[in-house]
Amino acid sequence: MSEPENPVVAESIGKTKRLNKAFLSVFGDPNRRSSDQELVLEHLRECSGKDNLMFGGSRNIEFNPYIAAHLDGARSQFLIIERRIANAMKEPDNKPKRSVKK
């Protein structure tokens, strides 16, 4: 992909790439995370309710649209983390290097 001619756009793309790489640095490659990184991401997944339906309601709990919107906002934060990591993994310079065994 060629670089944009507009310097503002180029700067914005550069910042986005750096931010994606920073997320990858903090949260790790999904295929090679440390146990600490896994622990933190699992905690964030649980706290954000990432795997729960927010607006679907439940048979046991009366549906409250305000609580659902609040929980959906928390869930979106976890999805941002996942999306940033996925975008960083698409960049050629962020792909894991293969080690050569001698």
Image: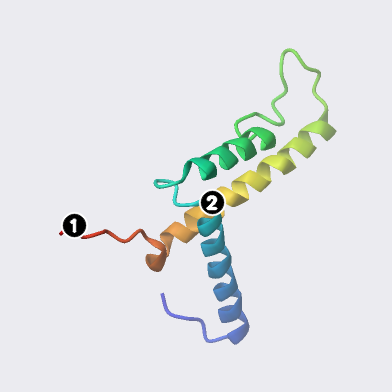
Task: Read off the residue under disc 1.
Answer: 101
Per the image, label 1 sits on a secondary structure element best described as loop
Q: Residue furthest front?
A: 102
* Farthest-out residue, top: 60
Q: CA distance from mark 1 to mark 2?
A: 27 Å
Say which mark, if any, is on residue 27.
Answer: 2
Residue drawn at point x = 72 percent, y = 13 percent: 59
Residue 21 in picture, x, y percent from top left = 51, 63
Horizontal side, residue 91 vs residue 39: left or right:
left
Image quadrant holding the N terminus, namely bottom left
Quarter location, residue 66: top right
Residue at 37 percent across and 66 percent down: it is 92
Horizontal side of residue 98 vs 89, given as left or right = left
N-term mark: 1 or 2: 2
Q: Is residue 48 above or below residue 84?
A: above
Mark 2 element type: helix
Image-based side of 25 in relation to 47, left or right: left
* Residue at x 78% of width, y 17% of height: 61
Q: Amino acid at mark 1?
A: Lys
The residue positioned 67% from the left and 40% from the top of the image is 75
Residue type beneath disc 2: Phe
